[in-house]
Image: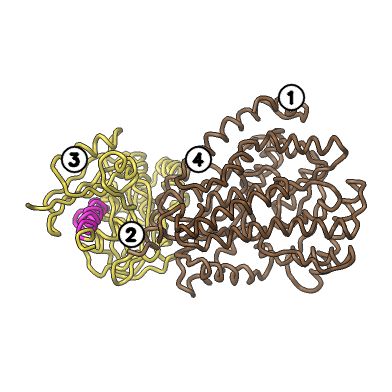
Chain colours: A brown, B yellow
C-alpha cells in the first residue's frame, strides 16, 4: 500500500500513527479471516476491499472530490444514505472499531465511555482515519447520550450535523423524524450544491434498496444447514456495506450468493452439518472489532445472523418506492428508518419480536448478547432480551466487552462453556 | 486389558490430575502450576491412557501437545461435582483466579452459569494476597485465624489492591489481626453470595476449587445463604475428576455409535 503515502500525506494524516495501524490490520485479518477453512471464492473481493481499506477506496473518494463531489461521514444506520446519493454525494461509515489515540481522546472525553465513541474521537484527534479526513460533513444522531454529547466536541474539529432520532415511535415522533429527514435533505443539497429531483431520489432509493436486497439474499442463504458461509465473513461484508461503492458492492454480494446457491445443490458448507448455530445481538461491531465472533467460530459454533446495526438492522427493511413526489419519497425514507429496532427506543418490543422470529427461522441453538462496555441502551435492554428468551427456552449468554484483548481468555472459557451447554450431546 | 482415562486440570495456581478405571479413581495428584505449566502437566502423565482430557486455563496448550480433547472448567466441575454428590443442582467453584457459579438440571447437565469478569476479586488470589499482607504463613493459617476474629469491622473495597491498602491501614489503627482477617473473608463471601443469588441458585450446593478448603469461607457462606454447603474431600481435584469422567464417557460413546 506504500504507493498511497503521498495521498495520505496530502490528507494531513499522522503518518507515524497511521503506519502503526496499518501494521496491525493485515496480520489480524490474516489470523481471523484468511485461516478459515472452506471459504467461498466470492470472499476474494471482500478480502481485497479490506486490504485496500485505506487505499483504493480513499483514492476513489479523492477523485470524487476532485470533480466537486462531497463526502458525508456517518456512524449510524439512521443516516439516510439515499438522500446523500440522490444529490451526487457519497456516504461512508467512519472508523471506530479499534483502540486508537486513547490518550488524546481522554483529553476531551471521560475515561469510562463506550469504546466506539472513544475510538472515533481518537481517530479524529490523532488524524489516523483517512475517511474522516476526506469528509466534508459528519452526520451524527442522538441514538445514545454518549454520542449525542460527543458530537458537540467532535464539531470543534470537523463540521457535524446532528439528526435528532426520536426515542419513541408515537405519531408525533414520526413527525419529528420526518422533519429531521427533510432538514437533512436541505443540508445535503446545500453542501453538494445539487438540488435533489424526484427522479434522483427515486433512483437512489432503488439503488440502496438493491444493496439491501443483496444482503437480505445472503441472510436468507444463511438459514441452510450445513452453514454455507461463516458469520465472520458475513459480518465483514455487512461492515463493508457501509463504505463501499453501492452498485459494485451489490453486484459482488449477488455473485457470492450465486456461488452459495450452487453450494446448496452440492450440499457443501463452510462448517459441518449440525454445527451449533448462534445469533449474535447487541451493540454494533465496527471494523476491526471481530473479537467475539472470532472466539465463537473458533470454539465450535457458527454465527447464522447478526441482530446488530452491522447486520440485520442495516438492511432488513426497504424504502417503499411507490411515491411520485420528492416529499412523498422523503416520507417513505423517514418511515423505513424509524422502523429500525435500536435500543434507544422505549419500548423496543420490535427488537424482542424480531429476535424471537430469527431464533426460530434460523434454527438457532442459542443467542449471544454482546454489548460494548458502557453502552447503556444495549447493556440495560439485555434484561428484556433475557426475559423474553427464557420464556421461550432459548439459551442466552450475556457479554460486555471493549476493544482491548485482555479478557480474551475469560471470554473464550465462557463462550466455549456456552457452546458445550447448547450442543446436542 | 484395563482401560485408563486421565483428566488433567491446568489452573493458574495448581494442576489436578485424576486417573479413572471403571468409574474408580486409581490415581490422583495435585501439583503447583509453577512457571512452566505444560512441562509440569506432562510430568504427571507417566503411564499409558486410553484417553486424556484437559481442562483449565492450560487446556488448549495441552490439546496441541498431548491431550485428546478439551472441556471447559465449567463443564468439568459440573461433571465432577455431580459425580461426587449425585443430584447436585449448583456448583460454586472458586479457584486461583476466578469464581464460577454453575446451575445443573436434574440430569446433571449445565443449564446456566456465571463467571467473574476480568479481575481476581474474591478468588484464591485475593485470599493469598491478603494472607501475605497480614503476615500469615499461609492461607490455611489465615482462614483459621479469621474464625477467631470479631465482626465489628467491614472491608469496603473489593479490588484486591485497594482492599490490601484498607487492611494495612486497619492494622496501623491497631485493629486486631484476626478481626481484619474475618472482615476480608466476609467480603469474599458477600461477593460470592451475590453471584449465587443473581443466578437464583438451588440446592444441593457443591463448593469446589481450592478456596473450598478454607473453613471460614465455608462457614460464613452457609450462614449467609442459610443452606448446607457440600464440600468434596479434595475440592481442588473436582475439575480433573470431571475431565477424567468426560474422557471415559467419550470413549464409551464412540464404542456405541
Circle 1 SS class = helix
The residue at 29%/33% (across/down) is B36
In the image, B51: left or right of A125?
Answer: left
- Mark 3 or mark 2: which comes first in sequence? 3
Quadrant for residue A200, please give it: bottom right
Circle 3 SS class = helix
Evaluate if marks 4 and 1 touch, with contact meaning CB atoms under 8 Å apart: no
Up the image or down, A32 lies above or below A399; here it is: above
* Location of residue B173 in the rendering, given as x and y in whole percent from the top left corner: 43, 43
- Tell me the residue that label 2 is attached to: B92
The residue at 75%/28% (across/down) is A7
**Gap between marks 3 and 2 measured at Cα:** 27 Å
Which-is-in-front pick, marks 3 and 2?
3
Residue in the foreground of this view, choosing between A210 and B80: A210
**Magenta-colored segment: predominant secondary structure:** helix
Evaluate if marks 3 and 4 touch, with contact meaning CB atoms under 8 Å apart: no
* Location of residue A166 in the rendering, given as x and y in whole percent from the top left corner: 76, 64
Which-is-in-front pick, marks 2 and 4?
4
The residue at 74%/49% (across/down) is A74
The residue at 61%/31% (across/down) is A22
- Tell me the residue that label 3 is attached to: B44
Check the residue under mark 2 and report the chain it is in: B
**Gap between marks 4 and 1 measured at Cα:** 29 Å
Amino acid at each position: 500500500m506504500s504507493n498511497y503515502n503521498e495521498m495520505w500525506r496530502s490528507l494531513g494524516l499522522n503518518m507515524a500513527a497511521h503506519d502503526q495501524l496499518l501494521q496491525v490490520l493485515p496480520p489480524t485479518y490474516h489470523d481471523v479471516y484468511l485461516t478459515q477453512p472452506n471459504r467461498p471464492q466470492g470472499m476474494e473481493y471482500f478480502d481485497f476491499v479490506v486490504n485496500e481499506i485505506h487505499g483504493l477506496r480513499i483514492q476513489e473518494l479523492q477523485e470524487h472530490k476532485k470533480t466537486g463531489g462531497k463526502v458525508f461521514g456517518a456512524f449510524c444506520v439512521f443516516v439516510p444514505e439515499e438522500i446523500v446519493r440522490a444529490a451526487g454525494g457519497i456516504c461512508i461509515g467512519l472508523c471506530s472499531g479499534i483502540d486508537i489515540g486513547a490518550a488524546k481522546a481522554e483529553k476531551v472525553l471521560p475515561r469510562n465511555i463506550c469504546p466506539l465513541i472513544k475510538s472515533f474521537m481518537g481517530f479524529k484527534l490523532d488524524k489516523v482515519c483517512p475517511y474522516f479526513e476526506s469528509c466534508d460533513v459528519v452526520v451524527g444522531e442522538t441514538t445514545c447520550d454518549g454520542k449525542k454529547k460527543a458530537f458537540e466536541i467532535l464539531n470543534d474539529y470537523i463540521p457535524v450535523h446532528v439528526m435528532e432520532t426520536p426515542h419513541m415511535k408515537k405519531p408525533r415522533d414520526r413527525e419529528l423524524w420526518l422533519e429531521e429527514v427533510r432538514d437533512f435533505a436541505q443540508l445535503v443539497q446545500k453542501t453538494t450544491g445539487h438540488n435533489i429531483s424526484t427522479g434522483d431520489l427515486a433512483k437512489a432509493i432503488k439503488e440502496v434498496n438493491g444493496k439491501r436486497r443483496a444482503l437480505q439474499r445472503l441472510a436468507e442463504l444463511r438459514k441452510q444447514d450445513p452453514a454455507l458461509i461463516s458469520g465472520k465473513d458475513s459480518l465483514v461484508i455487512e461492515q463493508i456495506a457501509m463504505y463501499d461503492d453501492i452498485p459494485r458492492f451489490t453486484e459482488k454480494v449477488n455473485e457470492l450468493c450465486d456461488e452459495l446457491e450452487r453450494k446448496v445443490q452440492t450440499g457443501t458448507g463452510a462448517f459441518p452439518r449440525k454445527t451449533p448455530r448462534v445469533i449474535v445481538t447487541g451493540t454494533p461491531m465496527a471494523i476491526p472489532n471481530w473479537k467475539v465472533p472470532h472466539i465463537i467460530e473458533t470454539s465450535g459454533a457458527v454465527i447464522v445472523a447478526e441482530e446488530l446495526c452491522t447486520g440485520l438492522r442495516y438492511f432488513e427493511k426497504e424504502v417503499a418506492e411507490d411515491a411520485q413526489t420528492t416529499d412523498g419519497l422523503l416520507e417513505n425514507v423517514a418511515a423505513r428508518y424509524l422502523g429500525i429496532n435500536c435500543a434507544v427506543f422505549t419500548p423496543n418490543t420490535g427488537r424482542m419480536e424480531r429476535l424471537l422470529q430469527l431464533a426460530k427461522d434460523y434454527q438457532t441453538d442459542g443467542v449471544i448478547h454482546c454489548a460494548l462496555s458502557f453502552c447503556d441502551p444495549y447493556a440495560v435492554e439485555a434484561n428484556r432480551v433475557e426475559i423474553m428468551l427464557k420464556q421461550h427456552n432459548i439459551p442466552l449468554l450475556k457479554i460486555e466487552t471493549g476493544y482491548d484483548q485482555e479478557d480474551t481468555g475469560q471470554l473464550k472459557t465462557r463462550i466455549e462453556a456456552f457452546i458445550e451447554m447448547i450442543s446436542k450431546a | 486389558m484395563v482401560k485408563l482415562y486421565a483428566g488433567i486440570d491446568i489452573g493458574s495456581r495448581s494442576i489436578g490430575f485424576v486417573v479413572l478405571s471403571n468409574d474408580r479413581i486409581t490415581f490422583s495428584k495435585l501439583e503447583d502450576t509453577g512457571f512452566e505449566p505444560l512441562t509440569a502437566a506432562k510430568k504427571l502423565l507417566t503411564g499409558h491412557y486410553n484417553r486424556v482430557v484437559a481442562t483449565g486455563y492450560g487446556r488448549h496448550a495441552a490439546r496441541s501437545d498431548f491431550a485428546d480433547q478439551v472441556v471447559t472448567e465449567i463443564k468439568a466441575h459440573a461433571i465432577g461435582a455431580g459425580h461426587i454428590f449425585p443430584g447436585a443442582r449448583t456448583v460454586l467453584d472458586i479457584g486461583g483466579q476466578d469464581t464460577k457459579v454453575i446451575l445443573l438440571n436434574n440430569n446433571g447437565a449445565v443449564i446456566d452459569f456465571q463467571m467473574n469478569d476480568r479481575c481476581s476479586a474474591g478468588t484464591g488470589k485475593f485470599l493469598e494476597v491478603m494472607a501475605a499482607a497480614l503476615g500469615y504463613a499461609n492461607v490455611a493459617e489465615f482462614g483459621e485465624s479469621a474464625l477467631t476474629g470479631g465482626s465489628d469491622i467491614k472491608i469496603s473495597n473489593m479490588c484486591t489492591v485497594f482492599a490490601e491498602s484498607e487492611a494495612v491501614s486497619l492494622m496501623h489503627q491497631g485493629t486486631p489481626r484476626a478481626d481484619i482477617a474475618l472482615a476480608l473473608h466476609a467480603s469474599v463471601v458477600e461477593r460470592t453470595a451475590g453471584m449465587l443469588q443473581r443466578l437464583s441458585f438451588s440446592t444441593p450446593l457443591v463448593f469446589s476449587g481450592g478456596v473450598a478448603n478454607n473453613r471460614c469461607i465455608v462457614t460464613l457462606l452457609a450462614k449467609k445463604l442459610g443452606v448446607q454447603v457440600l464440600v468434596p474431600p479434595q475440592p481442588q481435584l473436582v475439575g480433573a475428576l470431571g475431565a477424567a469422567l468426560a474422557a471415559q464417557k467419550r470413549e464409551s460413546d464412540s464404542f456405541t455409535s
